[in-house]
């Protein structure tokens, strides 16, 4: 094993010794729950547990492209709540920014569409938005781009936007079930193998192909999971470390152990 101890201090020591020079970070909705954005699968509080009012055949249908094509209303009912802009990044987002500031961040792979990573100051060039974002929208049939102002008006008015060219349905370019991931995901998929540390936070690792990213980390390079529950087989390798619990608390402990505690708080408060 490469870690002196298979716990938080082992990871911190590895980082302090300068052995983590390229870090990949893989995140999901759990890193934004403390900002006030629900995740998907937590019992009771998750989005999928609270969709009864939409009368869906199954919860994930709200993000299913075939279902959307036949019935776009449920997605547009939710869209107002999902739209980014009303939330502040969490200390976990600031921790990722700190990794970047220290020159250690190779790439951040996010499943989130809330854009809080950018807002925390992680540059766009370091982020792979694997499930797309609300930054652009287009026709699902002819792919013609649609303006942000116009979609905003439809969402506020709770009406369904349609393509000016072919009258197909317009949808924000977030990835639905049944749709391909953005090419940036595939172009950067080799990077986890080049990393000397992998950090996984706030994801249930249930949605493929994202869920396979942590397995691409080289054997013999440490991986750390900071999450409320154990997921995705992390813990199965000798240099895996599980930090189970709240991710804000977890990154604070890790930063503290690395000697970055004050810097992290200052960055978050800024
Ligand atoms: P999930 O809701 O599936 O998982 C969130 C994970 O974060 C769970 O393991 C929670 O226990 C954990 N969690 C929640 N709050 C936390 C906190 N404060 N601290 C630590 N852990 C916490 O969300 P994702 O894994 O992001 O895709 O879901 C993946 C994809 O499924 C989403 O991108 C979305 C969804 O359907 C699409 O819509 C295409």
Image (tube, rainbow, N blue to C red):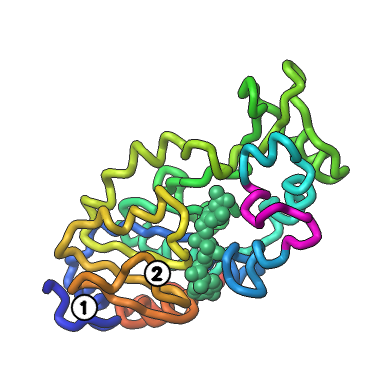
Quadrant hosting residue 211? bottom left
The residue depicted at 17 percent of the width and 72 percent of the height is: 17
Which quadrant of the rendered structure holds the N terminus? Answer: bottom left
Which quadrant of the rendered structure holds the C terminus? Answer: bottom right
Task: Decide whether residue 69 is among the magenta residues.
Answer: no
The residue wearing badge 2 is 231
Is residue 265 visible to the viewer in this orientation of the structure? no
The residue wearing badge 1 is 13
The residue depicted at 69 percent of the width and 39 percent of the height is: 68
Work out whether 129 lies above or below 162.
below
Q: Is residue 235 found left or right of 181 in the rendered image? A: left
Which residues are drawn in magenta? 51-63
The kind of secondary structure element at disc 1 is: helix
Position of residue 217 measured from the top left corner of the image (x, y, whole percent): 24, 57
Disc 2 residue lies near ligand 1 with CB under 8 A: yes
Work out whether 88 lies above or below 261.
above
- Numbered marks: total: 2
Position of residue 242 measured from the top left corner of the image (x, y, whole percent): 33, 77
Specify the label residue 102 is tagged with.
none
Single out the residue that lies furthest toward the right. Answer: 157
Work out whether 255 lies above or below 87.
below
The one of 58 and 37 positioned closer to us in this rendering: 58
Quadrant hosting residue 201? bottom left
Is residue 22 visible to the viewer in this orientation of the structure? yes
Instruction: Identify the main secondary structure in magenta.
Output: helix
Q: Earlier in the sequence, mark 1 or mark 2?
A: 1
The one of 92 and 238 positioned closer to us in this rendering: 238
């Amino acid at each position: 094993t490469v870690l002196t101890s298979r716990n938080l201090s082992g990871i911190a020591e590895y980082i302090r010794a300068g052995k983590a020079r390229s870090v990949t970070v893989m995140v999901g909705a759990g890193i934004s729950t403390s900002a006030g954005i629900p995740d998907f699968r937590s019992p009771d509080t998750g989005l999928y547990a609270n969709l009864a009012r939409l009368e869906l055949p199954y919860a994930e249908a709200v993000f299913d492209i075939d279902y959307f094509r036949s019935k776009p209303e449920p997605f547009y009912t939710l869209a107002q709540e999902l739209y980014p802009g009303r939330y502040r990044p969490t200390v976990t987002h600031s921790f990722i920014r700190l990794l970047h500031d220290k020159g250690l961040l190779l790439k951040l792979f996010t499943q989130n569409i809330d854009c809080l990573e950018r807002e925390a100051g992680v540059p766009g060039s370091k982020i792979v938005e694997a499930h797309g974002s609300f930054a652009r929208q287009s026709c699902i049939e002819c792919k013609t781009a649609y303006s942000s102002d116009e979609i905003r008006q439809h969402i506020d008015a709770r009406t369904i936007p349609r393509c000016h060219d072919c009258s197909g349905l317009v949808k924000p370019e977030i990835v639905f079930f049944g749709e391909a991931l953005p090419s940036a995901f595939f172009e950067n998929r080799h990077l986890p193998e080049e990393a000397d540390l992998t950090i996984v936070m706030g994801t249930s690792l249930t949605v493929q192909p994202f869920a396979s990213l942590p397995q691409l980390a080289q054997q013999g390079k440490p991986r750390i999971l900071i999450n409320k529950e154990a997921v995705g087989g992390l813990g199965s390798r000798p240099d895996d470390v599980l930090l189970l619990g709240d991710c804000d608390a977890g990154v604070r402990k890790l930063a503290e152990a690395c000697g970055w505690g004050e810097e992290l708080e200052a960055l978050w408060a800024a």
